[in-house]
Structure formats: structure tokens, C-alpha cells
Image (cartoon, rainbow, N blue to C red):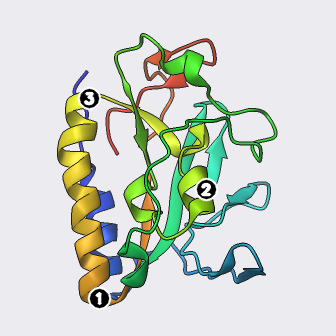
Amino acid sequence: MKQHLSGFVLYLMILGSLNAQVPSGIHSFRKHISSPTIGKAHFEIPETKPKDKVIRHSGYSLLYNEAQEQASWVAYELTDTETIKLYNRTNKFIVDPMVQTGSATQADYKGSGYDRGHLAPAGDMGWSALAMQESFYYSNMSPQEPGFNRGIWKNLEEKVRDWALENKKIYIVTGPVLRNGLPKIGPDHVAVPEYF
């Protein structure tokens, strides 16, 4: 199966980088979180339903889709100063303790032929040791073909960092395009998206 970037996702990212008006269906929701360990964060979050439980980590927020065993979307703010890498990748993929139903695991990806593709990239989380660690939660992963993950997806991640530098601050919402009937991998039946 060949994976593709969704034009809508690119459109949202470009709008966010240009501080343009966000299309209907997405609303600006800035949640201020303040704590000694994570400081203050602002998130641009897609519209949610009353029953949805948004999970907030130090560097990003997500809405977990249990039926597809991955995030429906991940949202975060990236500032120009956050693009300065202070901490290296940990490469320690772990289960997200905040997903009450349990997230995907290493067993889902082992031998599948798919990469554990970051939705909120580790490259955007080098400003904090905690944010870097949390970027390796399986709830922040989606199965990606190696060529896609290490090619166009990586290039897009780098472009987003360029936009943050150029614009001082951008809001990013990213994720897979999920639907019923997608191929699945692993014992937890993680859906393999065709589009992101």
C-alpha cells in the first residue's frame, strides 16, 4: 500500500504558518497549562465532541482513537526557540500511561515492515527532556512505510521547523486519515493509514 500526504493537512499547516484564518470545523482552543515541570503551553486543537478525552502531554495534545489504536490527531505549538535542540532523541518507544485503554505496543510493529512514524516529531521536542521522552509514546505513532517516513514525512517535519523559525510561532495539527476497513497490524490491530 502506498502512503500519501493529504492536501488538507498541508493546507492547514500552511495556514497555521501564515497566521491565516483557520477553515470551519477547526476552532482555536488555547489551553493554558502551568506547572513547575512543563511550564506554560498553548495548543491549537481541532473541534472535539463532549465525550472526547483530549490527552495533554508537555509538548503536544492528542485525541486517541481506540478503534484504530492510534491518535486521530496530534496538536502542538512550535516556537522558534523550541527548534533549538537541547536534548537528543531517546529512541525509547513506550506505552502511553495516559491512554486508559492502553495504546499500541512494540509487538504491534515488530516484523510488520512499518516504521513507528511520529505524528509530533521528536525533532520538534528537543527543547525539553520530558517532551522528548513523551514524543516516543506509542500514542504518538502511526504505521508508516519506511520510504514515506524517512522521505516526504521527514522533509515535511523539517519544513515545519523552518516555518516556526520564519514566523516565530506556529500551530500544528497532524494525523492519519482514519476510516473503517484499513489494513491492520499486530495483536492490537493498529490501522495502517493510506493518507496523513
| Residue 71 versus residue 22 in the image, above or below | above
Give the structural element (helix, strand or loop) at label 1: helix
- Residue receiving disc 3: 146
Residue, x 25% and y 77% (percent of image)?
163
Where, by quadrant of the figure, is residue 61 drawn?
A: bottom right
The residue carrying mark 2 is 62
Q: How crowded is mark 2: few (under 14 residues within 10 Å), some or many (20 or more)?
A: many
Pointer 1: residues within 10 angstroms few (<14), some, or many (20+)?
some
Residue annotated with mark 1: 167
Q: Is mark 2 on a helix, strand or loop?
A: strand
Left or right, 102 with respect to 19, comes to: right
- At which x and y percent is residue 33? 73, 79
Q: Where is residue 123 in the image (x, y as percent from the top left)?
A: 37, 58
Residue 93 falls left or right of residue 174: right
Quadrant, the N terminus:
top left
The three-letter code of the residue at mark 2 reads Leu
Q: Which amino acid does label 3 sit on?
A: Pro
For this view, does 159 lie left or right of residue 24?
A: left
